[in-house]
Image (spheres, rainbow, N blue to C red):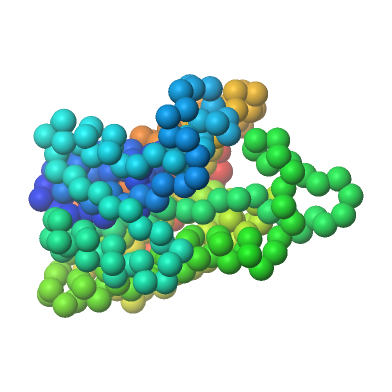
């Protein structure tokens, strides 16, 4: 049996009320970590009962609180607490860390998973492209740009800075930061602000790895390919599977296992790296 070294560590996972964040929180707890689950309930009806992937399911999942995830972790014998914060607010990071420390103690593992997504485009005339849910895509504006960068890059940078400050203050010598990007961060049409903000996240991550390594902190990036978090409609599944060497659609658990590896003792000599987790859908 491999000992991950995570037993008793405190992990803070953002955006963990559903999808990749929830799976990562559950996976870390299974390794003995005590997990603080950050979430933000977005507009929608969390009680919508459907298993059909698409806008209704995806919206319902994002509108949930973290109670289900907390209960699952505790039912398996793990330790979990949760708190709701809007990471678009500039002062969210210190308040979130305060809550996590009060509940569980100093944070050892930080997983920045929370993200804002809204399709936008440079196209302003003629026929507008459509998003995953067959809705017209809005033209890029200052507001659409800023909404993405506030959560997907600024909040990540502020969370890492807050983590590093508190880490140093308590004299810690072991730390892990895992930032969740996307395999289209180099640039992708029709979701231009989302992908660009993830590219900024990757730049911040590499800079943090260089600066924080001497303090015993590793910083790495998980880059998921197509992962079924409720948004990939059935009509698109076959095409994705045909483009994926391992021949299936990814699951949140696939990404969670990679995040657990990067948090583990086995990844002690891995930092500043981007790990594609997509069954070979995208390769370096």
**Quarter of image, res 216:** bottom left
Left or right: where 246 falls relative to 252: right
Residue at point 41%, 47% (across, down): 41
Is residue 162 visible to us here? yes
| Camera-side residue of 224 and 197 | 197
- Answer above or below: position of 48 versus 32: above
Residue at point 55%, 31% (across, down): 56
Q: Position of residue 18 (x, y in %)?
A: 38, 39
Q: Position of residue 98 (x, y in %)?
A: 22, 66
Residue at point 60%, 23% (across, down): 234
**Quarter of image, res 269:** bottom left
- Answer above or below: position of 189 versus 102: above
Position of the N terminus, as image quadrant, is top left
Left or right: where 241 falls relative to 203: right
Left or right: where 20 falls relative to 34: right
Q: How many marks?
A: 0
Residue at point 25%, 76% (across, down): 165
- Answer above or below: position of 169 versus 107: below
Q: Position of residue 235 (x, y in %)?
A: 65, 23
Q: Position of residue 142 (x, y in %)?
A: 66, 68
Work out which residue is located at the far right of the displayed protein and give it: 126
Left or right: where 57 falls relative to 141: left
Is residue 278 visible to us here? no
């Amino acid at each position: 049996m491999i000992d991950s070294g995570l037993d008793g560590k405190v992990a803070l996972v953002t955006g963990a009320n559903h999808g990749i964040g929830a799976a990562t929180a559950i996976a870390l707890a299974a390794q003995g970590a005590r997990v603080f689950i950050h979430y933000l309930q977005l507009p929608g009806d969390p009680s919508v009962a459907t298993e059909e992937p698409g806008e209704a399911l995806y919206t319902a999942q994002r509108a949930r609180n973290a109670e289900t995830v907390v209960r699952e972790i505790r039912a398996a014998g793990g330790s979990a607490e949760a708190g709701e914060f809007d990471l678009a607010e500039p002062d969210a990071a210190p308040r979130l860390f305060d809550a996590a420390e009060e509940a569980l103690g100093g944070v050892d593992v930080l997983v920045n998973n929370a993200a804002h997504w809204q399709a936008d485009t440079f196209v302003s005339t003629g026929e507008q492209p459509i998003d995953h849910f067959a809705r017209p895509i809005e033209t890029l504006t200052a507001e659409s740009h800023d909404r993405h960068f506030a959560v997907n890059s600024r909040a990540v940078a502020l969370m890492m800075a807050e983590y590093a400050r508190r880490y140093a203050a308590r004299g810690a010598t072991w730390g892990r930061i895992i930032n969740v990007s996307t395999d289209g961060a180099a640039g992708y049409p029709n979701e231009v602000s989302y992908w660009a903000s993830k590219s900024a996240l990757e730049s911040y991550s590499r800079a943090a790895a260089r600066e924080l390594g001497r303090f015993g902190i590793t910083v790495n990036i998980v880059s998921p390919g197509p992962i079924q978090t409720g948004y990939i409609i059935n009509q698109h599944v076959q095409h994705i599977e045909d483009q994926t060497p391992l021949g299936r659609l990814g699951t949140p658990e696939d990404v969670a296992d990679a995040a657990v590896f990067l948090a583990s003792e086995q990844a002690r000599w891995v930092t500043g790296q981007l790990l594609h987790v997509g069954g070979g859908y995208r390769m370096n």
